[in-house]
Image (cartoon, coloured by chain):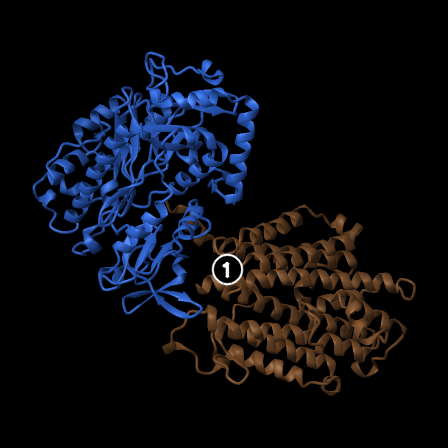
Chain colours: A brown, B blue
């Protein structure tokens, strides 16, 4: 398969998943505010700062808005075109990537990307404000539909595997950030990390985190109604069967990577396989106490860093142009990673103009 | 005659009508069609129009108009009434095109080798050597089988007497063949019964024929040539066609950045490493194909491609430098070219052409701007044109200046009233619209022409411009055995 096609499949999938997860981030906050309504003053900007902190965009946000509030944060994460991670931007980028490989994906997949794009064009801030629940549900459903369509109309070969890798890498990253929102919320209440204490509202916050991963019911089936932080973290990080847990997603990404390269448990053929295999093995033998020893926030941060490395290696192995002669020996000195704005989303004006000039 | 045709005014005193004779009777090969359309009500037509539109939309058959809102994609206008070409007329077109394309290929071979035709002064050397499409980098290179123009599409029109004339040869990257194929599919969906009534020659094998041609011209050292299509990218107006043909042939659709040259061999970058490419059906112009040889600012090309080509490690279809033979000035010499290389009289005639570079012709052109069609030699798509009878004095004066400033760049032809064909306007009434015909010629070990082509129709009342960028549409074209 052409590297360009593989790369576009990868980014189409990744942006779609990111759009869904941003919707989930926002959803968790609205859930929280509804639940906390009776307990504390909800216009507390801390609840909104946390969302910006976990998407690591504080500076860009501050350059665009004066305050952290429901309307500014929603506008930034849903509509703002200057934010490459806003839902609107992600869906546009997913569509651009899809459009450039329209002959390689099924027409049903293209139709679904297109549908969501056109739906978003018609949505106004007022509509989101009046009924956030329905709006976020719409986004989540569109993403689920896209995945279902992909699984049922697209051959499960190499291209499909790239879609899976992208989806699960993105999802792992987002679950880690979602759990981290909770950390940031607690931190912004307390003065420093030592002072973090668990109060009444704590359980409500954790339940919101579970809900935003569609995990509350699945959690209860395992742990009954014992909603305490240990169990919740165990479930969201280490469970191997729930599709929105970190361990599950890493396993799924690993499976897809290994299917492409032919790696197996005791033999890896490239660095992407090695790094994902290492991550998966560690997760398999991690207990919740190990995570506490390291500190939850540091554990999650470290995880996010390692996911970035896996992404870099996928890029190097499959998408970047290289011949054996110029293959970088030291992975630390590898070619630059295209990062969040990867894929072929951005065409330069000159390139576009030249394309149009051809007969 | 059917109710639609009762009110149809063929105006045969002025125009050649494809369906109605000068005496006012339907031509025999249209009999069955008129009967069938006679059975339709307006609602029938509407429902069939709907079938066709849904088909085109689902297939994503759209084109992009430049200069309007970015990314505006429109359905290609399609007329429901097919054009019928009887087999005996097709025979002439086919023979004429084979003769013409053979001679033009000989001509290119000569221009890029011994240049005999220039030395014998059949064609003034400065016209060739000064042409912006002459590629001196390519002199002495031997493309496989000596073929330069693997895929061509000459535009054919009919004059007032119904005689077929060649209006222009497209020897670089003629587009539109996907519309030819899709028009047929759409018609089959909407009018299955009509297909029962005619013996229509099939065109559906075009992609297979194209692939076979491309495989035949691969470098001789490679047994199973790896063929790819090279597109400028998604913003090109013909992108749909590029991706359509790649899909139909089952080959990779590539962009410049998918290809790399190493040791004068061309490879695609794949997830499994590099794979060698043998034949490139390229839809990128010469000027952009290799930044090391042609335009250095090209972002669409492949660095080193031309050298790989010169080494014979990869074949380009069409070859580099073919534009020198479809220049509108060279066009006027094609009858001489046919006579020179084949010793035959042209089967298909040219439209009479005056060259502004010829002083006597220039005088005539300037004196008759109001009745001639003036064309820039190197423009296509209906741009850079003056249609005398429809122009204003200011436009004529502007053209006069441009012609005098650069006579090599202009030709003039009499305003030919292209033949007309009844076409539906808003699906309610029939109107005679001007049409042309672009058959597609494939040149591998043999020359193959799929029976039919793209009939383009000027869907603006009275307009003579059939290009899709200027309000033209198309109709299905049937070559029928009587």
Name the quarter where the C terminus of chain A is drawn: top left
Q: Against A42, is B194 above or below?
A: above
Q: Residue A166 vs residue A187: left or right?
A: left
Residue at 40 percent of width and 43 percent of height:
B178
Q: Residue at x 36, y 78 (%)?
A: A325
Q: Quadrant of residue B15?
A: top left
Location of mark 1 (residue): A344
Q: Residues within 10 Å of mark 1 (few under 14, many from 20)?
A: some
Front residue of B97 and B296: B97
Residue at screen point 52% across, 53% down: A99
In the displayed orientation, state which residue is furthest to the top: B23
Dot 1: element: loop
Residue A343, position as x, y percentages in the image: 52, 62
Q: Is residue A195 above or below residue B44?
A: below
Residue B17 relative to residue A202: left or right: left
Kindly indicate the quadrant of the structure image that contains residue A340. bottom right
Q: Position of residue B307 (x, y in %)?
A: 25, 62
């Amino acid at each position: 398969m052409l590297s360009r096609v593989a790369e576009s499949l990868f980014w189409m999938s990744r942006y779609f998943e990111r759009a869904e997860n941003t919707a989930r981030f926002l959803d968790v906050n609205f859930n929280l505010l509804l639940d906390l309504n009776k307990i504390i003053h909800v216009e507390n900007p801390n609840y909104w700062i946390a969302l910006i902190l976990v998407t690591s965009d504080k500076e860009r946000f501050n350059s665009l808005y004066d305050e952290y509030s429901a309307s500014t944060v929603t506008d930034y994460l849903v509509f703002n075109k200057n934010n490459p991670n806003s839902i609107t931007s992600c869906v546009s980028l997913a569509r651009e990537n899809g459009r450039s490989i329209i002959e390689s994906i099924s027409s049903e997949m293209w139709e679904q990307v297109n549908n969501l794009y056109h739906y978003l064009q018609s949505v106004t801030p007022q509509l989101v404000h009046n009924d956030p629940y329905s709006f976020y549900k719409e986004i989540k459903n569109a993403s689920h539909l896209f995945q279902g369509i992909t699984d049922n109309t697209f051959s499960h070969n190499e291209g499909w595997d790239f879609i899976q890798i992208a989806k699960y890498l993105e999802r792992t990253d987002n679950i880690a950030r979602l759990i981290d929102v909770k950390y940031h919320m607690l931190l912004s209440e307390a003065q420093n990390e030592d002072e973090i204490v668990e109060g009444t509202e704590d359980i409500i916050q954790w339940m919101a985190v579970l809900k935003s991963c569609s995990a509350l019911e699945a959690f209860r089936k395992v742990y009954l109604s014992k909603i305490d932080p240990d169990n919740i973290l165990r479930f969201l990080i280490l469970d191997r069967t729930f599709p929105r847990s970190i361990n599950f997603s890493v396993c799924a990404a690993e499976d897809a990577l290994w299917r492409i390269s032919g790696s197996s448990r005791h033999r890896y053929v490239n660095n992407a396989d090695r790094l994902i295999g290492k991550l998966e093995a560690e997760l398999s033998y991690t207990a919740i106490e190990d995570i506490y020893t390291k500190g939850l926030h540091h554990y999650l941060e470290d995880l996010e860093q390692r996911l970035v490395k896996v992404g870099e290696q996928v890029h190097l192995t499959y998408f970047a142009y290289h011949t054996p002669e110029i293959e970088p020996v030291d992975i630390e000195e590898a070619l630059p990673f295209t990062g969040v704005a990867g894929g072929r989303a951005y065409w330069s004006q000159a390139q576009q103009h030249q394309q149009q000039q051809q007969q | 005659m059917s109710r639609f045709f009762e009110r149809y005014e063929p105006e045969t005193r002025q125009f050649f009508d494809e369906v109605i004779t000068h005496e006012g009777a339907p031509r025999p090969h249209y009999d069955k069609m008129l009967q069938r359309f006679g059975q339709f009500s307006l609602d029938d037509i509407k429902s069939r129009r709907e079938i066709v539109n849904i088909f085109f939309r689902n297939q994503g058959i759209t084109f992009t108009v430049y200069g309007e809102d970015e990314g505006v994609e429109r359905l290609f206008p399609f007329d429901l009434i097919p054009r019928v070409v009887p087999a005996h007329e097709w025979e002439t077109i086919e023979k004429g095109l084979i003769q013409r394309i053979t001679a033009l290929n000989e001509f290119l071979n000569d221009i890029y080798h011994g240049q005999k035709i220039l030395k014998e002064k059949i064609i003034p050397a400065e016209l060739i050597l000064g042409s912006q499409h002459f590629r001196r980098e390519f002199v002495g290179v031997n493309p496989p089988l000596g073929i330069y123009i693997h895929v061509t599409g000459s535009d054919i029109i009919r004059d007032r007497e119904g005689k077929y004339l060649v209006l222009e040869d497209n020897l670089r990257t003629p587009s539109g063949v996907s519309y030819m194929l899709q028009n047929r599919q759409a018609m089959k969906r909407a009018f299955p019964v009509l297909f029962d009534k005619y013996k229509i020659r099939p065109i559906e094998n075009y992609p297979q024929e194209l692939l076979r041609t491309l495989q035949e011209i691969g470098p001789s050292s490679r047994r199973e040539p790896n063929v790819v299509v090279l597109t400028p990218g998604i913003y090109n107006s013909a992108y749909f066609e590029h991706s359509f043909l790649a899909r139909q042939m089952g080959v990779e659709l590539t962009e410049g950045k998918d290809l790399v040259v190493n040791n004068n061999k061309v490879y695609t970058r794949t997830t499994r490493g590099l794979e060698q490419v043998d034949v490139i059906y390229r839809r990128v112009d010469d000027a952009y194909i290799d930044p090391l040889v042609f335009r250095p600012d090209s972002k669409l090309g492949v660095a080193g491609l031309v050298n790989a080509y010169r080494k014979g490690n990869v074949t380009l279809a069409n070859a580099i430098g073919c534009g020198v033979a479809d220049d509108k000035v060279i066009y006027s010499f094609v009858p001489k070219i046919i006579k020179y290389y084949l010793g035959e009289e042209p089967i298909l005639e040219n439209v009479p052409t005056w060259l502004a570079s010829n002083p006597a012709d220039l005088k005539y052109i300037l004196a008759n701007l109001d009745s001639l069609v003036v064309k820039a030699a190197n423009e296509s798509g209906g741009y850079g044109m003056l249609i005398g009878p429809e122009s204003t004095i200011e436009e004529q004066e502007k053209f006069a200046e441009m012609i005098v400033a650069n006579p090599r760049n202009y030709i003039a032809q009499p305003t030919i009233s292209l033949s007309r064909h009844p076409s539906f306007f808003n699906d309610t009434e029939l109107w005679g619209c001007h049409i042309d015909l672009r058959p597609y010629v494939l040149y591998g070990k043999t020359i193959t022409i799929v029976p039919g082509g793209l009939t383009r129709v000027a869907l603006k009342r009275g307009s003579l411009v059939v290009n899709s960028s200027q309000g033209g549409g198309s109709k299905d074209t049937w070559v029928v055995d009587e």
